[in-house]
Image: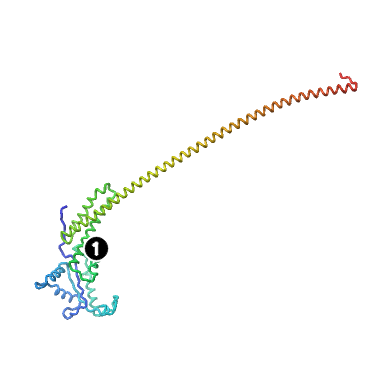
């Protein structure tokens, strides 16, 4: 990739205001902004007789900030200064002279013509970036030891370059997210990475070529790590899908086996019920045949008995007639009656 890296050549910061409290030389430089700026101009002036280290620090301050200001403040009183215990920020505890000077300084700082859009390295800083910058400076100053100008500059460069890295990384993520449904998205990895690197290449940077290479490598590492994470997730998802597919197939197989067993069981039950019905039908036919046979036998028996009874009745009738006739003969014989 051809390098067209753009480095910002202006001042890094906008305004720097020195607040000097407990100023004792009020006859030489009066309290407030005007006296503070006169003192600052004298203090930051350089000449050939100065120590090179002191001279370089003053020149760095002038080249780092677009505008320098200074305010001289009087002694705030023993309560604020901490000689009478803990100070809780109460306005009434301040000395009158200190409050008057402080109020003028505040009005100066917050006047509409001095409230400007915050920029670092010539670029507008949003709320999140400004907050991160404050956090970085807080880390530098919280030890109570005044950090070197170089440390502040390095912290600013780091925050600015990491801001560029984060923006380019977000551009990469958005490209990836917009194309999640594209087939073979892994093959598009280099294209998305190229988009992020081009954005990084076009951004205004700080710290020179070595710093540009360092943070480019950080960006590439972040992109490669997230892509590796995505690849690992995809492999894991594919493995989980394969396991789920096998489990579904196994469940389907078991379900079909269960259905087959239930079909066989139903068929067997129906077969048994059919055999039972057939056996009951056969038994019924046998019983019916036996009953019909017994009925016919009984009918035949009754017929024979009836015939026999008829014969006996005829015989009895004949016997009765013979008995009557014999009796008549006997009676006639006894009484001498002639029977014709």
Q: Position of residue 85 (x, y in %)?
A: 29, 78
Question: Residue extending furthest bottom?
Answer: 27
Choose between 222 and 254: the one closer to the eye.
Answer: 254
Above or below for 333 versus 46: above
Q: Position of residue 250 (x, y in %)?
A: 38, 44
Q: Position of residue 296 (x, y in %)?
A: 65, 28
Left or right: where does residue 335 sit relative to residue 295? right
Above or below for 285 versus 246: above
Where does label 1 land, which residue?
A: 129
Q: Position of residue 1 (x, y in %)?
A: 17, 52
- Local crowd at mark 1 within 10 Å, few (<14), some, or many (≥20)? some
Residue under the image location 35 percent in, 47 percent down: 243
Residue under the image location 79 percent in, 23 percent down: 319
Question: Residue extending furthest top?
Answer: 340
SS label for mark 1:
helix
Question: Residue extending furthest right?
Answer: 336
Task: Quarter of the image for the C terminus: give it.
Answer: top right
């Amino acid at each position: 990739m051809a390098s067209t890296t753009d480095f910002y050549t202006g001042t890094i910061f906008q305004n720097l205001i020195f607040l000097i409290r407990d100023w004792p030389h009020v006859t030489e430089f009066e309290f407030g902004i005007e006296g503070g700026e006169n003192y600052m101009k004298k203090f930051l002036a350089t000449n050939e007789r100065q120590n090179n280290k002191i001279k370089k620090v003053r020149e760095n301050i002038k080249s780092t900030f677009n505008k320098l200001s200074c305010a001289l403040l009087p002694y705030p009183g023993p309560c604020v200064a901490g000689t009478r215990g803990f100070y809780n920020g109460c306005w009434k505890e301040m000395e009158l002279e200190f409050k008057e000077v402080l109020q003028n300084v505040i009005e100066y700082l917050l006047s509409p013509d001095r409230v400007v859009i915050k920029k670092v390295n010539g670029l507008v800083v949003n709320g999140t970036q400004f907050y991160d910058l404050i956090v970085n400076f807080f880390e530098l100053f919280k030890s109570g030891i005044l950090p070197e100008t170089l440390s502040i500059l390095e912290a600013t460069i780091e925050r600015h370059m990491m801001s560029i890295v984060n923006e380019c990384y977000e551009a990469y993520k958005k490209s990836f997210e917009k194309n999640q449904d594209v087939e073979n998205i892994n093959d598009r990895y280099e294209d998305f990475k190229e988009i992020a690197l081009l954005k990084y290449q076009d951004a205004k940077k700080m710290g020179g070529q070595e710093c540009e290479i360092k943070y480019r490598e950080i960006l590439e590492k972040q992109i490669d790590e997230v892509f590796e994470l995505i690849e690992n997730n995809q492999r894991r998802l594919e493995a989980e899908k394969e396991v789920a597919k096998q489990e579904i197939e196994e469940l389907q197989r078991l379900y079909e086996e269960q259905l087959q067993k239930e079909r066989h069981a139903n068929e067997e039950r129906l077969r048994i019920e059919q055999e039972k019905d057939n056996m009951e039908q056969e038994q019924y036919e046998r019983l019916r045949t036996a009953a019909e046979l017994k009925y016919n036998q009984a009918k035949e028996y009754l017929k024979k008995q009836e015939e026999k009874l008829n014969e006996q009745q005829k015989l009895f009738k004949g016997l009765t007639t013979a008995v009557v006739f014999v009796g008549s003969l006997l009676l006639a014989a006894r009484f001498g009656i002639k029977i014709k």
